[in-house]
Image: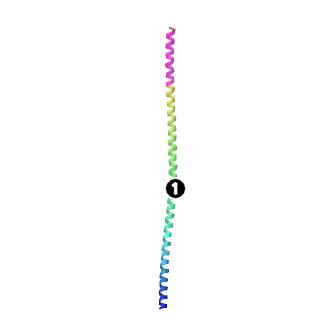
């Protein structure tokens, strides 16, 4: 009976060792899969960061282009406004001179 119990215990122990070995192999496979997933995600993150940098560069180029365009437009509009003011001043001066000439003619006659 004692020998029989010892044999049963040995069988149970072998069974447990076999099961633990299978579990260990499954865990190793799962760990390898997780490492692969981690590497893939790391590569995707690097790719996303590179794409983000390229998008930032393009955005900055577009913003610079828009800024240069607006600067040019602003400069043109300022010139036009200045030209209009000069024309108004010149026209105003012509009007004042005409009035002065007319007034002078009237007084000299």
Q: Where is residue 13 in the image (x, y as percent from the top left)?
A: 49, 83
Q: Which of 66 and 6 is in front in this view?
A: 6
Q: Residue at x 48, y 85 (%)?
A: 9
Q: Nearer the viewer, residue 81 or 14?
A: 14
Classify 10 Å Cα crowding around label 1: few (below 14), some (14-19), many (20 and above): few
Magenta region, residue range: 88-107
Look at the image and say whether residue 22 sits in the magenta stretch: no
Q: Where is residue 90 in the image (x, y as percent from the top left)?
A: 51, 23
Q: Position of residue 29 (x, y in %)?
A: 49, 71
Q: Residue at x 47, y 86 (%)?
A: 8
Spot the residue most to the top.
Answer: 109
Q: Residue at x 50, y 42 (%)?
A: 66
- Which structural element holds mark 1? helix
Look at the image and say whether residue 92 sits in the magenta stretch: yes
Spot the residue most to the bottom.
Answer: 1
| Above-or-below relation of 106 to 62 | above
Indicate the colouring scheme: rainbow
Q: Residue at x 50, y 30 (%)?
A: 81
| Above-or-below relation of 58 to 37 | above
- Marks counted in the figure total 1
| Above-or-below relation of 90 to 64 | above
Disc 1: which residue: 49
Q: Where is residue 36 in the image (x, y as percent from the top left)?
A: 50, 66
| Above-or-below relation of 22 to 101 | below
Query: Which SS does the magenta portion mostly show?
Result: helix
């Amino acid at each position: 009976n004692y020998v029989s119990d010892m044999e049963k215990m040995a069988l149970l122990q072998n069974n447990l060792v076999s099961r633990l070995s299978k579990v260990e192999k499954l865990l190793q496979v799962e760990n390898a899969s997780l490492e692969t997933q981690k590497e893939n995600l790391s590569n995707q993150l690097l790719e996303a960061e590179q794409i983000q940098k390229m998008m930032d560069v393009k955005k900055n180029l577009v913003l610079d282009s828009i800024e240069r365009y607006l600067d040019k437009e602003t400069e043109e509009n300022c010139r036009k406004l200045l030209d209009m003011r000069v024309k108004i001043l010149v026209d105003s001066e012509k009007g004042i001179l005409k009035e002065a000439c007319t007034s002078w003619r009237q007084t000299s006659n």
